[in-house]
Image (cartoon, helix red, strand yellow):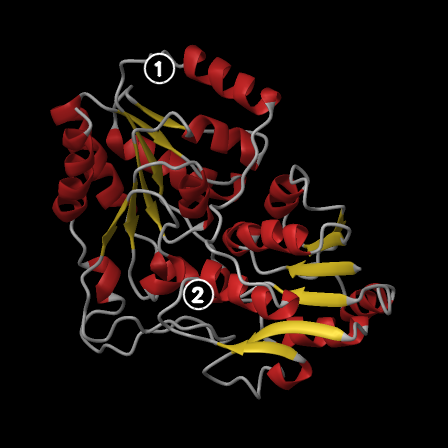
Amino acid sequence: MKILAIALSGIGDALMFTPSLIKLKSDFPDCQIDALVMFKGVENIYEKLPQINNIIFFDFLKSPKLKSLSFVLGLRNKYNAVINVYPANRKEYNLISFLIGSPKRLGINYLRKDFLNLGFLNNVTIRENDNLHNVEENFLLCEKFSGKKSPSIHDLHLILDKDDLVYAENYLKANSISEGDIVIGFHPGCSTLKNHEKRRWEPEKFSELAGRLIENFNAKILVFGGNDENELKDNIVKKINSDRALSVQTSTLLESAAVMKRCNVFVTNDSSLMHIASALKLNVVAIIGPTNTNYIRPWNTKHKIVSLNLDCSPCFFYSPKPLTCSLNDIKFKCIKELSAETVYKNVKDFLESVA
């Protein structure tokens, strides 16, 4: 059997599918599993996984539509089953799955606007459940496909090789980070697609939080993010104005992950690095505004979710529609009014519990 996992929507979503990859390989030990991806970070993670046979990389975002169509048709009739990695069940992904021509097309039917997103093109489906995590949704879908129940769901699967670990060791040594230091990781970024930069906690609050952690715990602050977030990271480090704060620059996502392993606590927006931190089993303080925390909370790791829990939250559910806010007084109040003091208390709880 040949299975294609369509993992186009992002790094975090692809990582949250890794427990299902383990299940598929267990249920169909002789199958070939390929992955269709369009982000280098996903390729970086998936190329290390023993469950994946081949990675097919194509940048749909930067390619003309006719070229994209030709590429998809080139995959036609090559797979027995195609899986749209939840939550990538929007019309573009469902159409890609349909055009590939697999007899089995797996996808999760959205509770909202499923027909408009061409959910009817899938023929092995389960219904979306707002109370379940993305990991659980994917796993249940794979259970339906294989017909085999599993007693438990695996952790997120992330492999760091020797080169990644040596890189981290050298990085920490070069920046005078020793075994006894308290190290706090920050990820102030997140995806900017569909207005999602509005999910970001303000840089000034990250710098205020860092100041308190440096003053009270003599902590060292490592600010992480992709190369597209370098300006954001550097701006926060500049505002912190301390030699105990560093903007982490690496060549690959897994090099960043290897450095992240050293963090005592990881403070993050709802982002791909939140899920990387979960895979690394870090203590995670997740700053969540408009998103349904049931979907994306840190999976199987110690974590604290910092949220105002407004009556209007969550307001973001999976949909192709850009993120918007219906409040008239303070737009995105759920994130803008989250104080540095509130986040600090959650970090402090972690630090004192392991002291």
Label 1 or label 2, whichever comes before in sequence order: 1
Left or right of 353 on screen, residue 19: right
Tell me which corner region of the image, top left, top right, bottom left or bottom right, holds residue 144: bottom right
x and y, in percent, of residue 132 in the image: 39, 67
Compute the Cα span from label 1 to label 2. Answer: 36 Å
Q: Is residue 351 above or below residue 71?
A: above
Give the residue displayed 47% in from the left and 76% down from the top.
Answer: 128
The quadrant in which the N terminus is found is bottom right
Label number found at residue 177: 1
Label number found at residue 195: 2
Give the residue displayed 40% in from the left and 70% down from the top.
Answer: 323
x and y, in percent, of residue 331 in the image: 26, 69
x and y, in percent, of residue 78 in the image: 86, 64
Q: Please, what is the three-letter code of the amino acid marked with disc 2?
A: Asn
Left or right of 230 on screen, residue 239: left
x and y, in percent, of residue 260 in the image: 42, 31
* Mark 2 secondary-structure assignment: helix
